[in-house]
Image: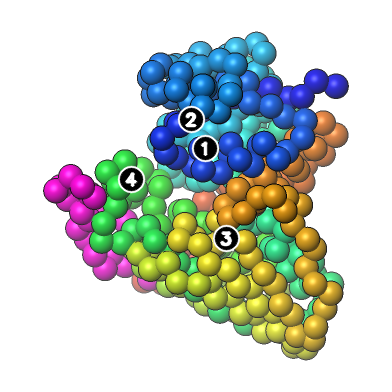
Amino acid sequence: MAALKLAIAGANAQRGWARDTHIPALAAVPDIELYAVSARNQMIADEAARTFGAVKAFGDTLEMVRDPDVDVVAVTVKVPEHRAIVLAALEAGKHVYCEWPLGRDVSESEEMAAAARVSGLHVAIGLQGTNSTAVRYAASLVRDGAIGRPLNLRVVSSTAGWGTVAPAHYAYLQDRRNGATLATIAGGHTVASVEAIVGALEEVSARNTVLLDTVELDGTGETVKRTCADHILITGRHANGCVSSIEIVGGQPIPLRFELRGSEGTLEITGHHPGGYQCAELRVSCTPARASQPAASFPELTSAPVNVAQLWKQFVEDIRAGTHTVPDFEDAVRLARILDAIERSSDEARTISVAD
């Protein structure tokens, strides 16, 4: 059977998430090959194709997703551009891997999820941290009763982003209207893994704060106004009765703190990466002691590409086998609704039921 032909929307040989994670990850994943790339103009696309070894280069992403030879589309562009590309790819009959956040808000996410359901195609949302070997192992320990009944969880999740200085091409991350914020990116990845390990949140109470409202754009002498929170405090209650305290910290790449206390033991997750926990290689420890966590599927990879490769591997297997094991657009909608509840809780200074 021929390898699946992949097209990456948002390829850039000079910088970006596609270059830093997807390209090295895909090189380690069998049964899929890079076929096409697109960028905001033909010159950047041509350079990316030469650098990454793609057969075709497109200055028009919508033209690329309609190429009859493309099987799978990876959407790695800015969040405000996700909707148009995802809907066009689904309409063209392509399987879609879209980076998280799926849309700028709940309604955009719901629209894309509905289109995916109608299409019958396979879709994946880039919650690679949730799909990592360590998080899946931690979830299995809790599910199997290794620490008894989960009682309380403390999490501190940080990132170097949303500090006092940002690269010019990340200026859009400071505007909450774009849907790519500390709350949605660092917060979304963290909350998704918390739910994967501890179980569904039923209610949340939060305080989202803008501590530094002016951001310097590195090397330009310019500043922009920050309208999104750069610090978030969440308390939650889960369906199983566990209570959680989650702090999302911008501008401080400190080590991850994930401490879960159960009725019969404790579980901890450690890791450190300036891009946030979803980029880090995580380690799980459990008391009482259990067998060591499974070895990584891709020992030749390090840092952020490890988790991305794991997600790609499972996604390719899903497409081939007709299974559905990876986080998909339905998961993205649920997470978007939780983040909306967190924002409403902060705005209205009250506890919000996730179901509402």
Front: mark 4 or 1: 1
Tell me residue 210's x, y (percent): 28, 64
CA distance for labels 3 and 2: 22 Å
Point out the tag, 2 or 4, that comes first from the N-terminus. 2
Tell me residue 250's x, y (percent): 37, 64
CA distance for labels 3 and 4: 21 Å
Point out the tag, 3 or 2, that comes first from the N-terminus. 2
Residue 304: numbered disc: none
Whether residue 202 is visible, yes or no, is no
Quarter of the image with the N terminus is top right
- Residue located 31% across and 67% down the image: 209
Point out the tag, 1 or 3, that comes first from the N-terminus. 1
Q: Which residue is mark 1?
A: 18
Provide the residue span drawn in magenta: 202-228
Quarter of the image with the C terminus is bottom right
- Residue located 51% across and 21% down the image: 50
Tag 2 near tag 1, CB within 8 Å: yes
Q: Amino acid at mark 2?
A: Ala
Q: Amino acid at mark 4?
A: Tyr
CA distance for labels 4 and 1: 15 Å
Tell me residue 108's x, y (percent): 48, 37
Structure colour scheme: rainbow
Asked whether 34 or 237 is in front, the reply is: 34
The question of residue 223 being in magenta is answered with yes
Q: Which residue is mark 4?
A: 170
- Residue located 67% across and 36% down the image: 27
Q: Which residue is mark 3?
A: 280
Point out the tag, 4 or 1, that comes first from the N-terminus. 1
The question of residue 68 being in magenta is answered with no
Q: Which residue is mark 2?
A: 11
Point out the tag, 2 or 1, that comes first from the N-terminus. 2
Asked whether 102 or 317 is in front, the reply is: 317
